[in-house]
Image (cartoon, rainbow, N blue to C red):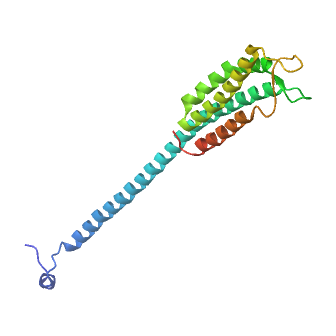
Amino acid sequence: MTSVDPAAFRSGRHPHDEHMDSGLAAVLGAGITGSVASLGALLTYRQTKVQLRSNARLALREPRRKVYRDFLTGSREAVQAVLDLVDEDTGEVAVGPLGLALEERSPVLMRLLAEVDLEGPQAVSDAANEVVGKLVELHSTALTADLSGLVDDEGRPARIGGDFLADVRTAMKRFVAVARTALATDAD
């Protein structure tokens, strides 16, 4: 028979309580350690998720940046081709060569516009379509005047003067602003 300390017995403590306290402490310690480890894993998971989203946005942004840049470059080349035709003395351009210059650049601009349309978002696509629309309007004006056989007072083929590229330039500025916004945000 095991002897029991009468003082321990009167105090209400069982002789094995000391072992139970250390066992309980070990279980609680393991639980706390496990909870801290789980919390650490959760925080790591969330950080990884944020990083993956950031990488995905960057992966989307870079192709868009290239497409937008190519479109803007193509549009500026079309405008420059027209400006190269302007007579320095009069500030005018003959409608025939103007129409041809824009017609030559049309296939490239249409391909670049299609790329912008596919990359999106819609606001950038709309702005790019506005640029091409203004160039098409200018081409149509030149083509119509050329085909009509209009001549000036001196018998020269019809010419266009003044700031006939103003609408195109305005549309290009809008495209740049909308494209910058799309590249700076998570726009779809």
Please give left or right for residue 183 compared with residue 97 in the image: left
Provide residue 109's location: percent of width, then percent of height.
66, 24
Q: Which residue is found at the position 48% from the left and 50% from the top?
A: 47
Can residue 96 be seen here? The reply is yes
At x 79%, y 28%, the residue is 80
| Direction from residue 122 to residue 158 in the image, left or right | right
Counting from the top left corner in percent of width and height, residue 95 is at: 78, 20
Q: Nearer the viewer, residue 74 or 2?
A: 74
- Given residues 152 and 20, the one toward you in this image is 152
Q: How many marks?
A: 0
Q: In the rendered image, which quarter is residue 19 located in?
A: bottom left
Which residue occupies the foreground of this view, 24 or 71? Answer: 71
> Residue lying furthest left in this view?
1
Which quarter of the rendering shows the N terminus? bottom left
Specify whether 120 is left or right of 141.
Answer: left
Which image quadrant for residue 175?
top right
In the displayed orientation, state which residue is furthest to the right.
89
